[in-house]
Image (cartoon, rainbow, N blue to C red):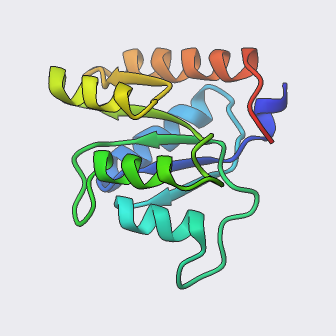
């Protein structure tokens, strides 16, 4: 149950997708604290404390969209994996695109999973429930 304490960072630029994700968490009874960043640069600023205090505790789980303004998801992943304090974060890509080169690039940057967003909300609820089960099964680093 340690993952129930894990903070989650949503790196998603679309406000409707952020709301949909938060509603899905609530509908599944997931009470993890959620933080939101609209692009990779803002996410790194939040995680590294650039221009503001860093998020404490550091989110152990990151849900990442790839198609982001200013700094895209793959560029964010490259920088995250170079930071010795952040490289252990579990990152799950959640994308509406099923591009094989993006999937390969993401796994080469050690993502924990690549999820193609289902179009139907009920299927998305099932996806979030599966993620929650996974988080409760594994041990995350402190």
Q: Is residue 97 left or right of residue 139?
A: left
Instruction: Point out the image quarter for the C terminus.
Output: top right
Residue 54 in the image, given as x and y percentages of width and height: 65, 71
Question: Whole-percent x and y of residue 33?
Answer: 69, 49
Q: Quadrant of residue 32?
A: top right
Q: 124 or 101: nearer the eye?
A: 101
Residue, far right: 1
> Which residue is drawn at the image coordinates 66% and 43% (left, top)?
60
Q: Is residue 133 above or below residue 142?
A: above
**Residue at the image point whose x is 74% and y is 31% from the top:** 140
Q: Is residue 127 left or right of residue 15?
A: right
User: Looking at the picture, does residue 75 appear above or below residue 90?
Assistant: below
Q: Is residue 113 above or below residue 80?
A: above
* Residue at horizontal 62 percent and vertical 25 percent from the top: 28
From the viewer's perspective, is residue 45 above or below residue 37? below
Q: In the depicted view, which residue is nearer to us: 1 or 99?
A: 99
**Residue 22 location (% of width, % of height):** 52, 43
Residue 55 in the image: state x and y as whole percent.
Answer: 67, 65
Q: Is residue 129 left or right of residue 42?
A: right
Tell me the quarter of the image containing the N terminus.
Answer: top right
Residue at the location (31% across, 56% down)?
A: 13
* Total labels drawn: 0
């Amino acid at each position: 149950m340690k993952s129930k304490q894990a903070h989650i960072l949503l790196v998603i630029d679309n406000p409707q997708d952020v709301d949909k994700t938060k509603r899905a968490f609530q509908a599944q009874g997931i009470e993890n604290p959620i933080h939101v960043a609209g692009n990779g640069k803002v996410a790194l600023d939040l995680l590294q404390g650039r221009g503001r205090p860093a998020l404490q505790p550091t989110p152990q789980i990151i849900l990442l969209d790839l198609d982001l303004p200013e700094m895209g998801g793959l560029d964010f992943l490259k920088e995250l994996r170079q930071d010795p304090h952040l490289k252990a974060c579990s990152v799950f890509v959640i994308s509406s695109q099923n591009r094989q080169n993006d999937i390969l690039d993401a796994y080469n940057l050690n993502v924990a999973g690549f999820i193609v967003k289902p179009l139907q909300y009920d299927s998305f609820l099932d996806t979030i429930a599966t993620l929650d089960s996974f988080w409760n099964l594994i041990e995350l680093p402190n």
